[in-house]
Amino acid sequence: MIFGYVPLAQAHLDKSDPSPPVTIKIIARRFEFQPKTITVHKGQPVKLVITSVDVDHGFAIRDFNVKEKIKAHTTRVIEFTPDKTGRFRFYCSIYCGDGHEDMEGELIVTEEQSSSDDASRMQVTFDENAPGVVIVESNGERIRIDTSKKTVTSISPRPEPVEEAMPQTHEEQEAARVADDSRKRESEPYDYRLVNVPTPKRVLRHSLNLYFTHRFSEPVRPLRESARDLLGLDSFSVSSLGLFYGITDKLYVSAYRSPLCQVALCKTIEIGVGYHWLDEGGRSPLALSTYASMEGDNNFTGNYTYNLQAMLGRSVTKYAHVFFSPAVHINSNGQHRFNPKPEDLFLPFLPEATIQLPQHTVSFGFGVDVRVRPNTSLLFEYTPRVGFKLGLIEPIFNDSFTAIQGFKQTTEAEIGFGIERRIGRHSFSLTFSNTQTTTTSRYNSSNFGLPPKRFIIGFNLYRRFFR
Ligand SMILES: [Cu+2]
């Protein structure tokens, strides 16, 4: 096929006032408009016939106050008359998935129509397989002219590109890879974590991701009980910051710091490496990633814990995903540092503590993500565990409350729930959980020993850069 821009002055219709609207057909699909570039003339009415071939999309041109919704599998006609020349961005104004922000194009408005302009935006293709056949394309309209049979047929809109075509140039390969990423990401309409439990979501190659968690310390209480402490929101809070980076589309590294400081636990830094093994789909019924990390207290200077974790995810329906994340936490009570010591409880006169807690932990994170809107999900998770459990350590008094007989540990498995909203490269979750701890070896236990009916408010924030 030969593509070329050929002056076709004779094709130009005689202009008479008022000028008839120019009709342009546009296909909207995740995550592109076709054609991507539209050229029109100042003062000439434009009629855009936009068809969505998949989900709901929007079509907006801020400079001409155009903003319409195109429902899934419907066509919408938008009419306007450009009154200024220039290049104007048009874009999808309704969130349609991860990649939506790339769904845009350009409207070029040139000076008043003249015959030479008109010709310059026509594209003429000779069909090599059929001699004497010319395809003329202008603003999305395609006409097939068979000079031997003397027939003219309309063949718009442009046919879909053949998907199986082997990409040739580097740019085409890159474009194919990005499109492939979009499809994979679309099969993962969930985030890297629910509240604390991680998911097998793929970290994109060369993407730098910022992860911010915030947890208040006071449990949520009704306003009448906490008027001075608005739902616990005035209380002391812990803000942790993490970064993770995709070295390839499968391998990523991460670093995370939690400033939480309590007995035997303070200013933890976690450094980890993860690998994405499988996407759900094709032969794999599950998405699978694994993760290994090391945590050190006091800014990674001691009290090391080692974590090995698997993240499995599976869609149940189009809108619901279930997750399972088993993990081994080696030395989660290393040096038996969480065993009660009388001086930590401000009871230095007591004999040595009488409970010995286990040294390692195995945890089992279960989770659900239910998409209730295209970009909003409800989250729930539950993480029972065996072995060492973080919790509250309290003295046991004798019957007359005159002496302490020993200690007991109150501990609760982690429960969390929340609501997540994704906007392009951002996501925000409002969370409720019974723990302030967020590192891999700690999130599975409530550091307060709070029963599940007493939750603390928090939020998670993700931001992806560079991709
Ligand atoms: Cu969109």
Image: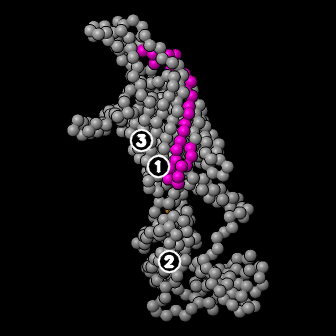
For the image, the number of numbered tags is 3
**Is residue 20 visible to us here?**
yes
Of the residues under marks 1 and 2, which one precedes in the sequence?
Answer: 2
Q: Residue at x 45, y 64 (%)?
A: 93
Q: Is 321 inside the magenta-drawn segment?
A: yes
Whether the residues at callouts 3 and 1 have beta carbons within 8 Å, the answer is: no
- The N terminus - image quarter: bottom right
Question: Label 3 belongs to which residue?
Answer: 417
- Callout 2: SS: strand
**Does residue 33 sit above or below 263 in this rendering?**
below
Residue 296 at x, y percent in the picture: 52, 26
Quick check: can you spot residue 302? no
* Measured Cα–Cα span from mark 3 to mark 1: 11 Å
Cβ of mark 1 under 8 Å from ligand 1: the answer is no
Q: In which quarter of the view is residue 69 placed? A: bottom left
Q: Which residue is mark 2?
A: 48
Magenta segment, which residues?
313-340
Choose the circle earlier in sequence order: 3 or 1.
Answer: 1
Q: Quadrant of residue 254?
A: top right
